Image (cartoon, helix red, strand yellow):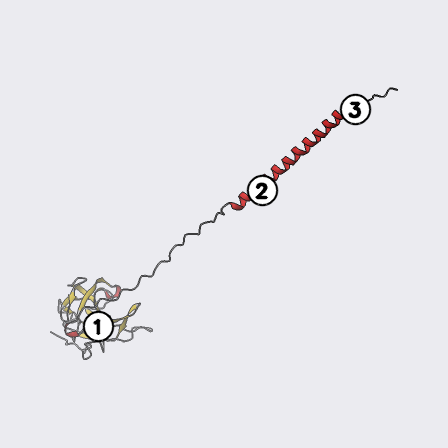
Amino acid sequence: MQVEIVAPRKFALVALAFFLTTLITLTISRWWAIGTARASAASFAGQQDATPTIAPLPTMTPLPTATPTPVPLLIPAAGGKIFACRVPAEFGVVTSKYGEPRGDNVVHRGIDYACPRDLKDVRVLSPMNGHVSFVGDLGDLGNAIIIENGGWRVILGHLAFWGVSEGQDVKPGDVVGICGSTGNSSGPHVHMEIQVWNDPWYWQTVPPQNLPGAEACEWESLKQLP
């Protein structure tokens, strides 16, 4: 059996080659690990420095504002008075007074002044200073006129015709229409209804007595014939 004898020079070269190969391999592995770690750190840092995205707040729709009820217009009255002792029908008789029963829990809301059937074109007169705020059909009251002054108003109903227009100023005794029987009516008459403004919501019907400037008026009396 022959034994190969390795020369010392050859052995040293082989050992040096093995050593260099191992060193290069370790160095490459270390550089790779360091590079991977740095990349991970940079990625994490970039995530930390990014500006967070904030969702925008929803748009708020403003609530609708309530429309205030307008205050009735005040027309200066002649002599400082609103009402006058002037009944609305030129001729006739009182057939129904304020507050009379009209069925279950219902009372008459005004005064009815009947006009003679055999007398044509009985004139309807304004009982107050003010301005005409309404002219037209009021259902059961038929053809009607509303005259206002400040917080007071008068409704004249069942007219055959009216002789004024909305916005027109009137004074006591002015002719505003002709007596009739329109609406829910059994005969020619004028329905006069007095109302006061109940702030801030509605008009309230009140008795015709004790009205400003008309405390002594006898609303429930009227001569029967011309």
Q: Is residue 94 visible?
A: yes
Tell me the kind of residue under disc 2: Ala
Q: Which residue is mark 3?
A: 8
Q: Which residue is mark 2?
A: 41
Q: Eyeballing the image, is 75 above or below 220? A: above
Which residue sits at x=20%, y=75%? 94
Q: Secondary structure under badge 3?
A: helix
Give the residue displayed 58% in from the left and 42% down from the top: 41
Name the spot of residue 46 as percent of width and height, x first. Answer: 53, 43
- In the rendered image, the residue lying farthest to the right is 1
**Is any part of residue 177 visible from this angle?**
no
Position of the N terminus by quadrant = top right
Residue underneath mark 1? 112
Between residues 174 and 105, which one lies in front from this camera angle? 174
Residue drawn at x 66%, y 33% is 27
Nearer mark to the viewer, of 2 and 3: 3
Residue projecting furthest to the front: 9
Q: Position of residue 194 (x, y in %)?
A: 23, 72
Give the mark nearest the N terminus, 3 or 1: 3
Measured as percent of width and height from the top left, residue 198 is found at 29, 71
Which badge, 2 or 1, is on the more N-terminal residue? 2
What's the amino acid at mark 1?
A: Asp
Separation of marks 2 and 3 at Cα, in angstroms: 50 Å
Q: Is residue 82 above or below residue 167?
A: below
Instruction: Report the front residue among 196 and 190.
Output: 196
Count of numbered circles on the image: 3
When asked about the image quadrant of residue 153, the answer is bottom left
